[in-house]
């Protein structure tokens, strides 16, 4: 049985990694890639793939919202992809839906594909989709923010508590997490990461910098009249966005 598969993730590197790990998988045809929720909704409705690798957390329209927007009767088999959300993972397990926890191995990916194939060949997706639809309808549609961030460093994966982060700076398509005197490089854009951070704790102060509000000591003027954010560790960061918004969030957290 040839499975027609679609990869949905707003990160190009993540989509490329799934495609690379799959390689020339027997019986699997990648029919396309989608970089956002609206594109995924339209593609699923139009092309009716058998299988979708669906990122849970995407800006604006999440993976769960993609499913809510697609009629359950045309849902493909879904392998969810998540970087952090253990609550979502538990829910998917309860509903017998497979998932991949980033960073995942090729063996885990292939096992998920074979699990989906077995269900499709057994025509066991109808009951599964009914249970998932019931869970989606009962789940409050509210943002779920990161508690920890998994960062691959050499042969190990480090889990960084978001409250331990002092600041985050962009480096091309990567984000550098500064925490406890260490720098952790995450293969994710700062814009994508910002959407998954709790706004009551984090504030973007420039195009390339996000600060932890709990680490801000003061805001001061620089020698040329620019605004500088002083962190408790002594670092000074240039601020180019609304000073008033930062001050309000520091005084009255949301």
Image (cartoon, grey):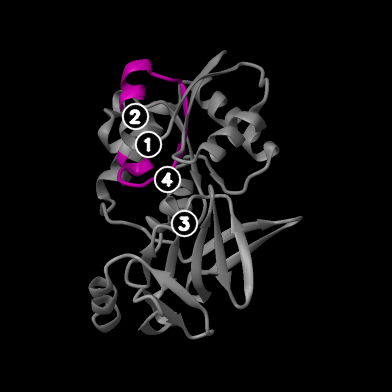
Callout 4–callout 3 Cβ contact below 8 Å? yes
Sequence-wise first label, 4 or 3: 4
The residue stretch that appears in magenta: 42-65
Q: Residue furthest top?
A: 1
State the CA–CA distance, disc 3 to disc 2.
23 Å
Callout 4–callout 1 Cβ contact below 8 Å? no
Sequence-wise first label, 4 or 1: 1
Residue at which label 3 appears? 85
Image position of 71 (left or right of 186):
left
Residue at which label 2 appears? 39
Residue at which label 4 appears? 56
Tell me if mark 3 has few (under 14), some (14-19) or many (20+) residues whose alpha carbon lies within 10 angstroms of its own.
Answer: some
| Tag of residue 36 | 1
Callout 3–callout 1 Cβ contact below 8 Å? no
State the CA–CA distance, disc 4 to disc 1.
11 Å
In this view of the protein, which residue sits in the foreground, 9 or 74? 9
| Tag of residue 103 | none
Callout 2–callout 1 Cβ contact below 8 Å? yes
Q: Please provide percent x and percent y for residue 192.
A: 43, 50
Q: Secondary structure at mark 3?
A: loop
Q: Quadrant of the N terminus?
A: top right
- Residue at screen point 67% across, 25% down: 23
State the CA–CA distance, disc 3 to disc 1.
19 Å
Sequence-wise first label, 2 or 4: 2
Question: Is 62 part of what is drawn in magenta?
Answer: yes
**Quarter occupied by residue 225:** bottom left
């Amino acid at each position: 049985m040839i499975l027609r598969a679609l990869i949905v993730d707003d990160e190009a590197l993540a989509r490329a990694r799934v495609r690379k790990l799959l390689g020339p998988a027997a019986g699997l045809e990648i029919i396309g890639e989608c970089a956002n929720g609206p594109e995924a909704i339209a593609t699923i409705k139009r092309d009716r793939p058998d299988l979708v690798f669906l990122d849970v957390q995407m800006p604006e329209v999440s993976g769960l919202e993609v499913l809510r927007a697609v009629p359950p009767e045309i849902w493909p088999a879904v392998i969810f992809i998540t970087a952090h959300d253990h609550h979502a993972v538990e829910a998917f397990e309860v509903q017998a839906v497979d998932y991949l926890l980033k960073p995942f191995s090729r063996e885990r990916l292939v096992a998920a594909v074979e699990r989906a194939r077995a269900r499709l060949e057994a025509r066991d997706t109808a009951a599964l989709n009914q249970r998932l639809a019931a869970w989606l309808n009962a789940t409050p549609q509210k943002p779920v923010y990161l508690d920890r961030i998994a960062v691959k460093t050499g042969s190990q994966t480090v889990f960084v508590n978001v409250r331990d982060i002092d600041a985050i700076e962009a480096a091309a398509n990567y984000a550098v997490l500064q925490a406890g005197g260490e720098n952790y490089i995450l293969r994710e854009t700062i814009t994508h990461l910002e959407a998954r951070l709790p706004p009551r704790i984090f504030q973007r102060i420039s195009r390339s910098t996000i600060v932890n509000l709990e680490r801000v000591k003061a805001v001061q003027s620089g020698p040329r009249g620019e605004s500088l954010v002083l962190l408790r560790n002594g670092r000074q960061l240039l601020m180019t966005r609304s000073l008033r918004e930062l001050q309000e969030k520091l005084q009255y957290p949301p």
